Amino acid sequence: MANEQNLSAHVALVTGASRGIGAAVALALAKAGAAVAVNYRERGGDAEAVVARIKANGGRAIAVAADVSQAASVAAMVEQVTAALGPVDILVNNAGIAIVRGVDDLTEDDFDRTITVNLKSAFLCTQAVLPAMRARKWGRIVNISSGAARGAGAIGVHYNASKAGMEGLTRGYAARLVKEGITVNAVAPSLIATDMMGGRTDLARNIPLGRMGQADEVAQAVTMVLGNSYMTGQTIVLNGGMAFI
């Protein structure tokens, strides 16, 4: 399904798309024909490199700087994307941080930052693009969660909470928006070989498949759900056979 999709009539916004999973998703959506806004907060050079790859293959893309945990910044970003590419009708909430903390080391600031960047950002971006989706009576929202939403994980309880909250947000929006032609789903990868994992390839020993996942495989799952108007409120789990993380 993902390889056959034609998204040429659509505009996608991918948050945190300068590298890793976000970059892979942006490239996959562009390959399917979507015009893509590559959001970043600090890594402008990396975001521009993703845009350059898309344009080299004949696609349309822009890099757009925004702190997606801030409402005013999100509003300005969506306005900029709409002016450059058109109204956003595909949103991938990928931006996030992973501050590794044990229970005894976790501070209130660590907790608040994680919830704000990982969870509040998904709320702010979703609210910002809903008017355009409702006007078209078509929209696709995909939230990048984690196996940590259901398992212990290695990052910390604050990260668990942020990702579990994201999946709750997914189900809540899905139930309320499906009658308007908007689906909301989540993709929950675990142990993906990205910069966030810091080269921890030793963790592959815990995976029945015997290797870590790749960002491109996460992007495949994201594009898969876009073409299914009946699937909503679901979480697609990518974990190489692990029951819990």
Image (cartoon, rainbow, N blue to C red):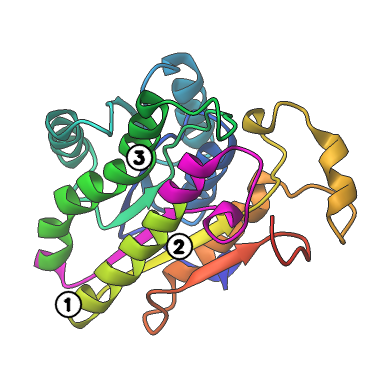
Residue at screen point 48% across, 70% down: 225
Which of the pair 16/7 is nearer the observer? Answer: 16
Q: Is residue 188 above or below residue 98?
A: below
Q: CA separation, marks 1 and 3?
A: 28 Å
Residues shaded magenta: 135-162
Give SS at disc 3: helix
Q: Examine the image and state in which quarter residue 114 appears.
A: top left
Residue at screen point 79% across, 32% down: 200
- The residue carrying mark 1 is 180
Q: Earlier in the sequence, mark 3 or mark 2?
A: 3
Which of the pair 67/85 is nearer the observer? Answer: 67
Q: State which mark lies toward you, 1 or 2.
A: 2
29 lies left or right of 8: right
Give SS at disc 1: helix
Q: Where does residue 238 sit, x and y in percent of width and height?
A: 66, 61
- The residue carrying mark 2 is 186
Tell me the amino acid under the disc marked 1.
Answer: Glu
Determine crowd level at label 1: few under 14, some 14-19, many 20+ residues with C-alpha closer than 10 A.
Answer: some
Determine crowd level at label 3: few under 14, some 14-19, many 20+ residues with C-alpha closer than 10 A.
Answer: many
Q: Earlier in the sequence, mark 1 or mark 2?
A: 1
Q: State which mark lies toward you, 1 or 3.
A: 3
Q: Where does residue 6 sit, x and y in percent of width and height?
A: 44, 65
Q: CA separation, marks 3 and 2?
A: 17 Å
Label number found at residue 115: 3
